[in-house]
Structure formats: C-alpha cells, structure tokens
Amino acid sequence: MSVFDRVLITGGGGMLATALRRTLEKRGVKTHVLDRAACDVTDERAVDDVFELRRPTLVLNCAAYTKVDLAEQEMELANRVNGTGAENLARGCAACGAKLVHFSTDYVFEGTLRRPLRPDDPVGPQSAYGKSKLLGEQAIQRVTGLDYLILRTAWLYGSNGPNFVKTMVTVAKAGKPLRVINDQFGTPTYTLDLAAATLELVDRDADGIWHLTNGGETNWYDFARAIFHEWGLMPDLQPTTSEAWKAQRPDSATRPAYSVLDVTPFEKAVDHPTRDWRDALAAFKAEVDRSGTF
C-alpha cells in the first residue's frame, strides 16, 4: 500500500490546500479536500467520523487559524483550531495508521537569533498566533504511535487566498500610500514550491520537524519593492519600523524580528537547492498572468 492511496486534505479552499491538491493531481493522485463544513477539526467526533468513512493513508493538515493580529483578541479560538484541531487529527491518524503532515510557522520562534533558525532551536512565540501553533506542534508530538511531519514555513503567498502579495498589488493599484516595515526579516514562500517540497519529503518517508521555505532572506519593505517591480507598479512606498507600527496599532501582534528558517537539512535530503524567493515571486507573477486572477 502506498501512502498516497487515500489522501485527505483539511482546510480545503485555502492557498496551501489548493496548491497541494494541484500538485497531487499532476501526479495523478486523487484527493479528498475537506473544508470546515465537511470537517471541523476542533470537533473530535466530526474528525472521527471522517476518518471512519475515508480511512486515509495520508492527511495533509491545512486547517488553521491564521489571522495573526485578531488572534490577540481570539486566543481561545486560535488555540482550539491550531492546538486542539491538530491533536484531534493526530489521534485519528495514529488510530488508523495514517501519516500526518502538519504545517506550522516561523512565529513559534522569539526572533532574537540572527542566523537561520534550525528545527531544534529553542522556541519562544511572542504572539497569540505563534503560541497557538506551538500548542499544535506539542500536541502532535505527544501522540504515541504517530508517523508525523511538522513543516514550519513562513510568509506564504499564492493563488486562492489573502496574502501579502495580493494586498500590496491591490493597495498600490488603488493609488494609496504604503508604509511597510523594514526591520523584520524572513523568507517569502510560494505555496506551489512548498507543496512540491512537502511531497518530496513524504516520498522519502521523512518524519519529525523540518523547515521549508524558498531560499534567501529579505524584509517586508524589500519584499514589497520586489512585488512592485514584478507588477510594474510605482506606488508611494516608504519604510517604517516595527516600533512605529506598533505605536500606531497597539493591538497588533508582536512578530519575530528575524525568522529566516534554515532549509539546509531539506536541501541535503533532496539533493537540490530551494528556489530563491525572487525567482519564486516571478513564477507567481507568471501564474497570475496566465490565470488572469489571484
């Protein structure tokens, strides 16, 4: 039996679920993509019912609470979705012998180290969102007899969902001035590249915690500049600092100052480098041009 015999994707309809489905379909793999109405991961009974019906061999968990700032006011909901939801899926996978692939975030780190972060580096989330994602990681690791992959990623963008690229292009086309933070560093990650990398690890029967992003690093301001270059836009764009942003928006979440993830273990495992974030952005622009929509 192949791990790809019965693939179940939660969080259907979102950016990453869409990218995974498309990537698997190109391989000829059929998937069951479930949105919240079909599978509320916070409902243990609902998860059990889905597992009993589908008997998955591989579960790709894209169900997540991702509203980083709003999570500061909705901590309980974020914890249920990102923590309890992950645990429910982990228990279901362990019971039926399925492999669980769970996507986590660079926001589980404090962001004070100034080098690419390794999977075994100390965690220290500074936001409610980051804490909720860490709860999910910890819950998965507590489930005995579970074959799991926890994939930390960062700064996701792609088709079929809200993201920084889409926001920047929309605001710029509306002629509005932009102030973008220039002292938070990370790596933008194209969902189609993340999906392909995920399946490369599954192909190799990898387990444990891995870091997956595109290559290189940048800050939000320079990322915005690169977006406008690709789209041929020239908005009123000015840099600002995290401190100034927080002063204007005191309810916003604290984000890591440096959360570049070390993808060297992945590159060694698959014997090729990850695509640089700039090249990935250009590929996304080409995808948008072909489809005519974000």
Image: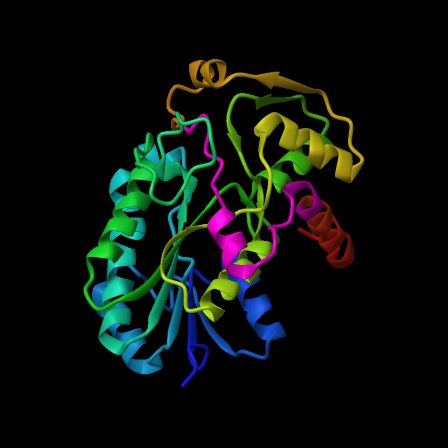
- Coordinates of residue 91 in the picture (x, y in percent): 23, 66
The quadrant where residue 206 appears: bottom left
Q: Residue furthest bottom?
A: 1
- Coordinates of residue 14 in the picture (x, y in percent): 50, 56
Query: Which corner quadrant holds the N terminus?
Result: bottom left
Q: Residue shown at 67%/48% (left/top)? A: 280
The number of numbered discs placed on residues in the rendered structure image is: 0
* Vertical relation: 100 (above or below) 178: below
- Coordinates of residue 114 in the picture (x, y in percent): 45, 26
Q: Residue shown at 54%/68% (left/top)? A: 21
141 lies left or right of 60: left
Q: Is residue 90 visible?
A: yes
Residue 53 is a magenta residue: no
138 lies left or right of 259: left
Q: Residue shown at 19%/65% (left/top)? A: 144
Q: Is residue 13 visible?
A: no
Q: Residue shown at 59%/75% (left/top)? A: 27
Range covered by the magenta-colored residues: 255-280
